[in-house]
């Protein structure tokens, strides 16, 4: 039985980033900041730093299933967050996991490229996510380049990509910031026709793990019972603050500061 102080559990199926900027470490930190408990299930190992990714290896399907099943059998999963999957087989693995979690919200961050541009899966992974995984997802959170890959519209606008993708998923958050505009426009589209635009000031520099931070925070807000539009707003606001306070520990991109300096003191 849950005690009054129990934190909502979020099952995170993501890749491991040895630089600590993205992937499961980003998920864990962002969820801690929301007052949630992260249950990390490793889907892939990567060779990457804050500059780019140079290699990756998707874990064996049975190992991933064993991790997820152990969590589900022991912990009351309140939401699921997906990050790097890396293969079509891993898409099928997630579908099997979600069949054991009926009604649990799923936030799909379609990680297809690293922040430095390196590939984190073949093009057929994006197709499999769109065709099969979106159907069991509550919301997907692609940035505009990822949305273009998923929609097969190389030069498509956010609106055009949403029109192509909404038949596959109920809610879609397409994040901006990849142009040179002074304000970043993040657009939430829903299949019922409702649309919300959230704007924020553009920050200088580029960031490693911003998408992971946003998606895991959104999963945490949903796990806490926050309504979707409000949860999106909360996640975007928190993510912007982590980017505003980001640091550059290596030779590449800035890493969001997801926890305060005195966290745990």
Image (spheres, helix red, strand yellow):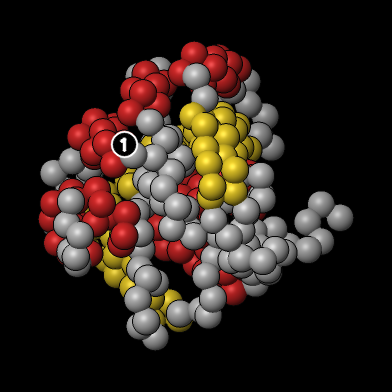
Query: Is label 1 in a helix, a strand or a loop?
Result: helix
> Horizontal placement of 135 versus 66: left or right?
left
Q: Quadrant of residue 202?
A: bottom left
Q: Is residue 84 left or right of residue 103?
A: right
* Residue picked out by circle 1: 125
Residue at x 57%, y 35% (from the top left corner)? 45
Residue 243 horizontal side relative to residue 179, left or right = right
- Determine if residue 238 is in view: no
Q: Position of residue 234 (x, y in %)?
A: 47, 61
Q: In this view, does 49 lie above or below 245?
A: above
Which residue is farthest bottom?
182
Residue shown at 25%/51% (left/top)? 149
Q: Is 263 on the left or on the right of 19, as rendered? A: right
Question: Which residue occupies 81% across, 61% down?
Answer: 262
Above or below, 259 relative to 99:
below
**80, 44: nearer the viewer:** 44
| 10 Å crowding of disc 1: few (<14), some (14-19), many (20+) | many
The location of residue 147, given as percent across then percent down, is 27, 55
Q: What is the x, y in percent for residue 228? A: 36, 51
Q: Is residue 182 visible?
A: yes
The quadrant of the picture occupied by the N terminus is top right
Question: Which quadrant of the figure contains the C terminus?
Answer: bottom right
Name the image quarter holding residue 10.
top right
Q: Which residue in the rendered view is the most extreme toward the front?
A: 54
Rendered location of residue 68, percent (x, y): 52, 21
């Amino acid at each position: 039985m849950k005690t009054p102080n129990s934190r909502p559990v979020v099952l995170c199926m993501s890749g491991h980033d040895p630089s600590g900027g993205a992937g499961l470490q980003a998920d864990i930190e962002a969820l801690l900041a929301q007052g949630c408990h992260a249950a990390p299930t490793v889907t892939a190992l990567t060779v990457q730093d804050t500059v780019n990714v140079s290699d990756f290896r998707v874990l064996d399907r049975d190992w991933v299933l064993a991790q997820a099943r152990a969590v589900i059998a022991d912990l009351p999963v309140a939401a699921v967050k997906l990050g790097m999957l890396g293969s079509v087989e891993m898409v099928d693995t997630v579908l099997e996991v979600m069949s054991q979690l009926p009604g649990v919200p799923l936030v799909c961050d379609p990680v297809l490229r690293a922040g430095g541009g390196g590939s984190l899966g073949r093009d057929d992974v994006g197709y499999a996510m769109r065709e099969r995984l979106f159907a069991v997802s509550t919301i997907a959170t692609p940035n505009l380049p990822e949305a273009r890959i998923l929609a097969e519209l190389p030069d498509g606008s956010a609106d055009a990509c949403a029109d192509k993708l909404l038949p596959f998923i109920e809610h879609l958050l397409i994040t901006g910031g990849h142009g040179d505009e002074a304000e970043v426009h993040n657009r939430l589209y829903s299949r019922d026709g409702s649309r919300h635009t959230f704007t924020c000031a553009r920050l200088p520099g580029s960031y490693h793990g911003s998408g992971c931070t946003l998606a895991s925070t959104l999963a945490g807000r949903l796990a806490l019972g926050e309504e979707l539009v409000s949860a999106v707003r909360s996640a975007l606001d928190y993510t912007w603050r982590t980017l505003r306070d980001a640091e550059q520990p290596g030779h590449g991109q800035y890493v969001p500061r997801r926890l305060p300096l005195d966290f745990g003191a």
